[in-house]
Each structure stands twice: as C-alpha cells, then as structure tokens.
Image: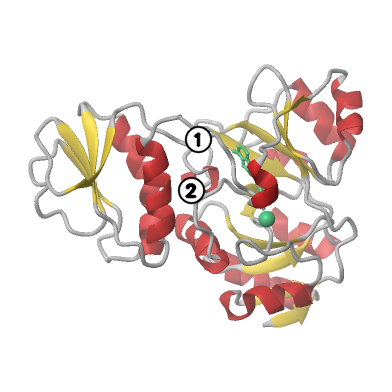
Amino acid sequence: MLLPETPDSLTLAADLLSAGKLVAFATETVYGLGADATQGQAVASIYNAKGRPSFNPLIAHFADASSAFAVVKADERATALAAAFWPGPLTLVLSRTTDCPISSLASAGLSTQAVRVPLVTDGFRALLRRFPGGIVAPSANPSGYLSPTTAEHVAAGLGEAVPLILDAGPCTAGLESAVVDLSGPDPRLLRHGALPVSSIEAVLRQPLTLDVDPAVKASPGQMTQHYAPNKPLFLGASRANADQAALVFQNATGFEDASVLEILSPSGSTIEAAANLFSALHRLDASNARSIVVSDIASEGLGAAINDRLRRAAAKRED
Ligand code: AMP
Ligand code: MG
C-alpha cells in the first residue's frame, strides 16, 4: 500500500511498526525500509523482504541525539558531530550500552550499533519519538539494486513485501549517509556519503582514517568485520558431546548430551531463527562448553543468510 504522508497514514505506520510490520519511509538520503529496532522478528523480516543474502548491520534512526545516545556510548567526538550535522546524512557507529534495547540482529552480533538522526518531516519525527529504541532501516530496495529515492521506486522494487510505503516526495540528498566509526580510538570513515569527509574532519579537528571497504561498490552494505564467537564453532554437526554447546534450527534429536542447547526456532520459522541467531550464539559462547556445534540449517527463506553468518563465524576473523 502506497499512501501520501498524512496524519492518518502516519498513525497507521506507527501501528504497523508497533505490530512488528515493515514501513518504508523517506529520509533526506534515500527511502528506508523500517522496523521497530527492539523487535527481533521485525528486524529479521527486513532481510527477508530485501532478499539480503547475509545479515549486515543496520542503521537505527532516532528523533533526536539524546534518544540515539541513550542506546550507545557517545563520547565528545560523537556529541560534537551530532551537534554539527544532526539531523543529517551522518551515521555514527558506537559501542552499544550494556542494556541496549536494540535487537542483536540489527548489529549482526557486533558490540557496536550504527545510529543516525535523519532529516525527516515533522510528522515522521513525531512518529520516531514513539520508538525510543529506534527504527532500523536499510535502503528500501531489493538486495543488489539501486537505492530508491522516490516512493514509486520502492513500490516497483519491493511491492507486496512492504505493507505500507509512506510517500513524502523525492529524497533531497539522494545519496546514502556517510558512516563514521567512533567505537575505537581513531575515527574511521566506513562509507562515503552525502556529507563530505572534509566537513567531518573540520568538526573532529583530526583526519579520518579511510576504511571504506573495496567490496562496497560491488556489494553495498558488505563489510569485513563480522561477529565471531571466542569458542571454536563447528558446522554441519549431527550430535554433540557433553563438553560441547549446541545450536540447532528446530530439532534437537542427537544433541541431547550437549552441555547447553539453543533451539533457534521451535516452530521452524527462519524469521524467528534469524531473530534469535546472535543472542543464542552469545549465550553459547558465554557457557562453560569447550566448543560450539551447529546442526545443518536448510537454506530456505532466511536460512541462506543464517548459514552465511555461521560460515563467517566458523572461519573466525579471517576476511
Ligand atoms: P544500508 O543498510 O544500505 O543503509 O547500509 C548501512 C551501512 O552502515 C553499511 O555500509 C554497513 O556496513 C554500515 N554499518 C551499519 N552498522 C554498522 C556497524 N555496527 N559497524 C560497522 N558498520 C556498520
Ligand atoms: Mg543499501
């Protein structure tokens, strides 16, 4: 459904988002495909709608800087950049707070979370205020296609996969946000975007380390850093020993001896499994087991993306 942004359609959008459904909306950069950041299954359904082959971390959008900085650890660099450029096309990657309410799937299991205060209509900003945990949104296009800058682009690309597209006219910037990682000592540019590097450096009063992934051009959103547990991870297992932790999709048969067991989806849904993936891995990694074994997971639906992340986790931090 494509509706012009009005008080009524904004109310409908807020109700859909609260119910765990997806809503496409305009920002100054590109149209985003949004979900309530605190609902794991809603976040998982973004990857499903886009047909993303992997779980890349998502940007969480907030009404204002104080809401954004309630869920991540902001330092002076972050507050200075926020004061200079928010609302605007700058995304900051910061460490998650210990009680960060955002689904671990939105961070792809990493300890960092990307946050942004976009330039949106007053109506949409009021909607964002109703979601203090943020609205996560990648660009509202099928994976591998161009980012949409009009509501019609979204409808043509994603159509039925989005319950509601809010039309607020064409995007003014039409380019993605610049992504700056402030989670370490040196500020790093992870993605070029609608804000020039020189403007960011002027506020930081120091040069940015350019860490723009060469794969980004071929495959936007692809990134080298990914979650890997500390314990060895073995894929394709059909049983577990007593000193092993086990991760299974739906059926625990054969894994009865595991010291800890995580079932990704008792109902057999790959959306539910995706929503649980990283939190389950974190729990298994924190257990007393020596290693983690993982049963085969069928590649239907989000299964392919789950398997992609598990393969990367098993390969440790090699790429
Ligand atoms: P998109 O979802 O298409 O808007 O792209 C989001 C961009 O932000 C991608 O380039 C991601 O790699 C980057 N990003 C989001 N979250 C993080 C994070 N926690 N760490 C590093 N990069 C991130
Ligand atoms: Mg994109």
Q: How is the image coloured?
A: secondary structure
Considering only vertical position in the picture, is 68 above or below 268?
Answer: above
Residue type, mark 2 in image: Leu
Where is residue 291, by image quadrant? top left
**In the image, what residue occupies the spot 24% across and 36% down?**
292
Q: Is residue 310 visible?
A: yes
What residue is shown at x 18% (from left), y 58% (from top)? 251
In front of the other: 18 or 319: 319
Specify the label residue 14 is tagged with.
none
Ligand 2 resides in the quarter of the picture at bottom right
Look at mark 1 in the image and give the residue it sits on.
99
Query: Mark 1 falls on what kind of element?
Result: loop
Pointer 1 and pointer 2: residues touching (CB < 8 Å)?
no
Looking at the picture, how far across and down is residue 17, in whole percent?
A: 59, 66
Residue 212, placed above or below residue 205: below
- Within 10 Å of disc 2 (Cα), the crowding (few <14, some 14-19, many 20+) is many
In the image, what residue type sits under mark 1? Asp
Figure quadrant of residue 116:
top right
Tag 2 secondary structure? helix
* Residue 278 visible somewhere in the drawing: no
Left or right, 206 with respect to 277, comes to right
**Viewer-side label of 1, 2:** 2
Q: Is residue 255 above or below residue 225?
A: below
- Residue 98: x and y in percent read 50, 31
> What label does residue 105 carry, if any?
2
Specify which label sits upstream in the sequence, 1 or 2.
1
Mark 1: C-beta under 8 Å from nearest atom of ligand 1: no
Mark 1 crowd level (few <14, some 14–19, many ≥20, 10 Å Cα): few
